[in-house]
Amino acid sequence: MVENAGKVTFHDAINGSGTELTIDISYSPPAGSLGQGIARLLNGMFENMVRHDITNFKHYIEGEEYKTYEHKPVLWDNAEAAVNTFK
């Protein structure tokens, strides 16, 4: 088991043409210094996985699949209730 934590922050882009993401991921590999050495070797692979996931998310949220739901009033009528659920 690898202890981990993460945070994703969304910011308006400086030029106003999009959104910038800041992603912080931290983890504590098991097996002491041996685990830390292996983790250092794998950091590039993990970074590529995160970048790939973000790219897929971007394509999904900007794509036609998302746009078909974007204008459905039923979803947006209940948005405030859904947001309040997570407070």
Image: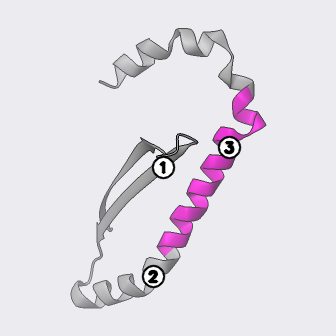
Residue 42 tag number: 2
Q: Residue at x 30, y 76 (%)?
A: 29
Say if the magenta span includes residue 39. Answer: no
- The amino acid beneath tag 1 is Glu
Give the x, y percent position of residue 8. 39, 49
- The amino acid beneath tag 3 is Tyr
Q: CA distance from mark 3 to mark 1?
A: 16 Å
Vertical position of residue 61 compared to residue 35: above or below: above
Give the x, y percent position of residue 3. 28, 64
Query: Nearer the N terminus, badge 3 or badge 2?
Result: 2
Give the x, y percent position of residue 17. 58, 42
Vertical position of residue 49 compared to residue 77: above or below: below
Say if the magenta span includes residue 56. Answer: yes
Q: Where, by quadrant of the figure, is residue 28 drawn?
A: bottom left
Q: Where, by quadrant of the figure, is residue 25 drawn?
A: bottom left
- The amino acid beneath tag 2 is Leu
Magenta span: helix, strand or loop, mainly?
A: helix
Q: Nearer the viewer, residue 3 or 21?
A: 21
Quarter of the figure with the N terminus:
bottom left
Q: Residue at x 62, y 10 (%)?
A: 74
Residue underneath mark 1: 20
Residue underneath mark 3: 60
Element on which disc 1 rests: strand
Q: CA distance from mark 3 to mark 2?
A: 27 Å
Can you tell which of label 3 and label 1 is closer to the viewer?
A: 1
Q: Residue at x 42, y 87 (%)?
A: 41
Q: Range of the magenta residues?
A: 46-67
